[in-house]
Image (spheres, coloured by chain):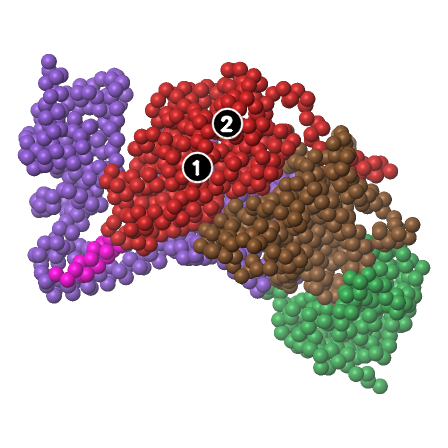
Amino acid sequence: MHRQYLDMLSAIVIACSLMFVTVSNALAQPILEPWDRFEIVKVWCSGEREARIISFQSLLEDVVDADAPAQQWAANLIGEYRDGNFRCARDTVYIPNDEQFLDVITGDRFKAIPDDAEKPFLNIPLRRALAPFASAVQLVAAEAPEERLLAAQGLARTLGDVSPALIESIYRQEKDMQVAAALEDVLVPAWLKSGDTDAQLKAISTLASNYTRTSRAALDKFLDQKTENVSEAVRTAAESARSSVHWVVQLSEVMTVAYHGLSYGSVLFLAALGLAIIFGLMGVINLAQAEFVMLGAYATWFVQEALRALAPGLLEYYLFIAIPFAFLVPALVGAFMEWSIVRHLYSRPLLTLLATWAVSLLLINLVRVTVGTQNLSFFTPEYLKSGFTVFGEFSITWSRLLSIFFAGITLIGTLFVIYRTRFGLRMRATTQHRQMAGCVGVSTRRTDAMAFAFGSGLAGIAGLALSTIYNVNPTMGTSLIIDSFIVVVVGGVGSVLGTALAALGIGQLNAIIEPQYGAVASKVLVLLAVILFIQQKPNGLFPRKGRR
Amino acid sequence: MRQFILWICGGSKIDRRYLVVLGLIALVTIGLPLLGLGSLASSPLGLDGFQVNMVGQVMAFALLAMAHDLVWGYAGYLSLGHGLFFAVGGYLIGMHMIKLSYVGETGVPTFLDYMGLTEFPAYWSGFEYFGYAFLAVIVLSALVSFLIGFLAFRSRVVGVYFSILSQAFVYVVMLVMSRNDTGFGGNNGIADFQTLFGFSLGSIEFRVAIATISALILMIALIGLRRLTTGPLGKLLVGIRDDEDRLQVLGYETLWVKTGIWCLSAMLAAIAGLLYVPQIQVASPQLLSPIFSIEIAVWVAIGGRGYLYGAIIGAILVNVVKFWLTRFMPELWPFILTGSVLFVVVVLRNGLMDPGPLFTRAKFLMSWRAKKEKV
Amino acid sequence: MKRRSFIKGVGVAGLAMSAPGIILPAWSQEKVKLGCLFSSSGSMANVEGRLNYVVRMAAEELNRSGGVLGRQIEVVSTDPASDWPLYGQQARQLLEEEKVAAMFGCWTSASRKAVLPVVEQNDGLLYYPLHFEGEENSKNIVYMNSPPASSVLPALEYLMGDNGGKARRFFMLGSDYVWPRTINAQLKGYLQEKWDIKPDAWQEEYVPVGHSDFQSLVNQIKSFADESGEQPIVVLTVVGNSIPNFFQEYINQGITALDVPVLGLDVVEADLEGLDTESLVGHLNCWAYLQNAPGEANQRFLNAWSEYVKANNVPFRGDVAIDPMVSAYSSVYMWAQAAEKAGSFDVPEVRKAFPGTNFDCPSGYNIKLTAENNYVHRGVFIGSVNQNQGFDIVWQSPETTTPVPYSSYI
Amino acid sequence: MRHPTAISVDALTVDFSGFRALDNLTLLAQYGEIHGVIGPNGAGKTTMMDVITGITQPTSGKVLLDREIDVLRMTLPERAQAGIGRKFQRPSVFEQLTVRENIALGVRLYPDSLIRELAFGEVEEKSDRVESVLKTISLDHLGDVMAGTLAHGQKQWLEIGMVLARDPKLLMLDEPVAGMSDAERDATADLLERLRSPARCILLVEHDMQFVGRVSDQVSVLHEGRLLCAGSMDRVTSDPEVIRVYLGR
């Protein structure tokens, strides 16, 4: 009896909701009554898009003058809806909520829900329309300023069909400065449209205060329109604002390119450093270096999985916990490789080239057979998600920043090891004059082994850093190896600083060329540049000086 | 008779192993038409089209390996970019075959079509004539190799540097050729060839013919290079490999000697490519992949460098095993390859042609262990 | 002395080995052989590798139900190692040495182009499970998947329509080879003729196959989006590992499907493995099969696959099924049916039997071949990334579409 | 009578990253004489030769052949062709070639050769030259043995022979008798005597003072990259500076 009644009612609701204005009035009621709630979710689950949008609208209007609990309920509801947590059943909606399901109408909790309860599909336009309303409702409902700030920023993306007047009124009462600022951004378009000069000036000053392409575009649009109701003062203000914004935007774009160069350079550096050290010490190019990078990444992954299983609490920090492992695993493999193969081939660098290539093939296939070819899934810690804007359009992504950070640390660490430790001393001695070092009692064999392990370990660190940027699979290294060779060649034999500079330089070159001429062209030009460079400086940036 | 054999061997004494390999190739040259065509083809000894085709490919690889050995084994420069010249030959003969199938009719292959071309661009003209194509192969490979060689040798890029640079070269060219706008079919390369010299590429006759020709050319090249390397130039090369400064102080423009050898090797590699592509019927950037170029060096290393015939043995051995394993135990192939490379490089060092180190090293290990026990 | 014989040995061994035909086991005669040409190593291994197992699975199913024409099926797998010419090489081997009745293989157009001359010269059969650029119709290849005209265009139409968000500006990003270029050529033609959209409304970028650093490209997408008020989308035709790399960067630079949705034409569930899909929700792809496809057939297939994975500890996820898997799976059945109908295994007969053969594909459609061409009629799905590394079905064609090998927009 | 100047080293300075190997060195050597160059280790004897042969590039200074030819402008081979021959300190003969082939390497010369090389041509008059050189260095009985198997002294002579083969104007010998038995020294001394000719200047770097005194007419003493003093052997040995340097008083 009750069920049928509800269905009938909902049918009517849907029917009416197609007739816009009348319907929105019809819904203009307090929203604590179960039936109203039911109407809302019913439309949201199965209504036409227009109907749903109208429903959002009316919900917003109702929320404004509803009491706190009702506001809270509405805010949660629309939030869950946006995040795709609805499970539409025949006569209600459930929301997954720690192991349980919450009936949004009655507020009861259930262990299980009917099988036919399914998740409504929100297509792109609907989600676009929904987003601003959701933010608006939360803006109204939320007490805490940070929540309201979030909501306001959400609105700043687009105001959608939310009425500017409403935001205006909220803005008027807003106490919190940040939120107010965010709201100004939201209101700019409205203000510009309004004939009112003060509003327009306010809008322009707001635009002038955030240096983005969008605000530049807005100003351009504003300046283009030939409307009389724009006063001279406004126009000049707009023009000056436009030019300043434009200038900063361009600067920020340059900065972006430079940053891209930096981050790519740091990747190159990480990959090439170990190579350079080993090459410098033993004149051996280790073609398996790229695979040590891969091993490092896999070690990181295993650490992550171990943490996931044993200490989920620490999972957030797996990247740092993994550092020693990412270093040690390749280091050990490297040491073994040195002991079993490389050391038998000193004074035969060319054969070593082939031997190490074979090893790289072996490593790739071992990993392929044991772990598989699929990309490993890495958990992205909160602190690595997205990034932040420095100024204008120049924004920095955390993961890239992390790799730069790692590169910096590695550089410092390596310099320390080489110039401040006895091992480093032995290494430098051996590098400069093998026999002599041998004579003064440096065990060159052990030094070589250690250095090889050290270089391999560095590659492992590179793998750790890369795991946050690229995806990890057995062949991840192959694309890196040649670029890092070029770096070593340019940097000069075994010079850490040389490697760093070369990596940065090539990174920049890439970043500058790629946007215009594409990835291939950048690689080609870089190589040509390197060849010409070698014509001038056959021994790289920092040749090892000394008497023959 | 003996005179003739000496002439073949070059130098003053008879080298049996060299003659064996030479004989082997001669055998293949004669055997292919006999076993591949005619009445014997159907006999249990007979070779079917696939086997003929495979022998043909291996012959082309052997030629390539020998060209590589000329640079590595004799001048001491390990090239990890010989695929570049191989590809020059391959692509140009490919252009020839494409052009052949478009003689007399309008229109262009799809990969040119994508670039919005309605007729062949200027640099394709003339490729319908084999003579022209062949000339182009020789000239282009010589040109490219001269450029690389001259730049590299002039600035005294040596040893590992040289290897890496050659690899970087082939890598970059691969990237360029993988682009569609380059006009050579991009990543797909150029394919669907129909005929060459009027043969249909699929026909057994053609396969036997090209395989035989490959073997013949291999034989001729082997004799030629053998005479070259045992002759005065060989001495010069040994000199360059062992102590280049010394030679220069003796007044040799080693730069030109090296560049000359490098170009010669490049041209041979290009010819090998020219023989290879009609047999696999596709010329794609894979010919330029760094891995392939390294594999060439691996053949030579396994066979043994500095013998010429060593390179040939290496190429035959590795590729036969590869063909065979990728079919029967695809999983095993990479491991076997790595295993054999490591064995040869670490234990044998000079390749199969010189199993000496095997024993000496064994002895060394023995004595070493004995010493350890004493201590 | 010793050495000489050693060398001779090498030579003889060489000749002997180069004739594996001799070494072939004899019993392989009674069984009928099918060949697999999917790489289990190299850059394509991650996606192609699964197809080997799917084909085996289908073959085993057929064998359990008595085989084909009373003969059991033996599947011969090879590993072309993602090396295009090697595909041709091994196709030749399968046809001329193994005498396989049909081959199932290739993912990239490059590999198919390498096999094409081989199958044509030997009059063999290749079942090709991927959707591709079309513009080809060989009598020796059965194209199991849709050409762009019947799969991509509907998806684009959807995105430009009301429910798709009225996309009007297009950033076309692809790997640099034939498939992406042809697709984009067709799209451009389509947009101009059907929607009268001007060339300044799109930007075309290509990266080398296997390109991994999308930093500056994603940045370009950003500025492309900011240029004008109209709704931009990305038409993504990069392949292989470039796909996850691209999405990783897309996430990192914080672009969502609400700002610039991505229509990933080669994106499959497998590519989302290892990505945090929360921030990818709403991006689209289009295939002739999606894992969430409704219907019994799909359930049966999914269960069979997950069991097969468990039983043979296959190194791939048992809970992920992608279009090419289903295509490869169906193709075995399509072949079996044709063979039964022809009452013979030799290709000309089988080919004659093609028209009318059909199969209840896991996608829920009854897919069929007609006399017109060698393209299988498939249904079309448009999927949208959901929170759990899968695709929700946004739209699916009422019935199978008629494939159009040669597009009119090119 | 004074012979014309063969080689003149003028204000030559060579820096290796910080360490100064040659410091404003000036040295003259005439045709027809055997000019000994002595000095303690690190005095810069070998470096000077390296500069003259072109293996090391000087920081500043001049080297003139026959008072006009600016040697520093030429490449290594060009210098050799201009008539500068040099025997290295450690014998650097090609051990995998026979003695005769080693000499032959010395005889045959770019550009006229390489073409013939490729034409497989043995060249008559040149092979005669090879034989005569073999006689001069009295290794004619060992023509066909591998150079690697020669005794140390014989290697030294062979290397001299290689250089000699082209009949250089300026013949630089870096420690030719190092590690030789007395008999071998005598032989070498005779060899040098035989090599002396008015058209040739022999620059002899040697530690063995007694040997230098025995063969050379002029002696220059180098110290820390500078010319300490030059003149006849007796004059030099009586020079207080030299004595101080050698006896470290």
Quarter of the image with the C terminus of chain A is: bottom right
Q: Residue at x 52, y 59 (%)?
A: B121
Amino acid type of disc 1?
Answer: His
- Chain A's colour? purple
Other-residue count near label 1 (Cα within 10 Å), few / some / many at <14 / 14–19 / ≥20: many
Q: Is-magenta flag for residue A220? A: yes
Over which residues does the magenta segment extend? A210-227
Relative to residue A314, is residue C342 drawn left or right? Answer: right
Label at residue C353: 2
Q: Does residue C230 lie above or below A475 as drawn? A: below
Q: Earlier in the sequence, mark 1 or mark 2?
A: 1
**Along the line of sight, the residue nearer the viewer: A476 or B54:** B54
Relative to residue A11, is residue B71 drawn left or right? Answer: right
The percent position of residue D116, horizontal first and vertical second, equals: 80, 65
Relative to residue B319, is residue C278 drawn left or right? Answer: left
Per the model, the C-alpha gap separating discs 1 and 2 is 23 Å
Q: Chain of mark 2?
A: C
The percent position of residue C291, horizontal first and vertical second, equals: 38, 28
- Chain C's colour? red
Label at residue C131: 1
Amino acid type of disc 2?
Answer: Ala
Q: Residue at x 67, y 58 (%)?
A: B131
Other-residue count near label 2 (Cα within 10 Å), few / some / many at <14 / 14–19 / ≥20: many
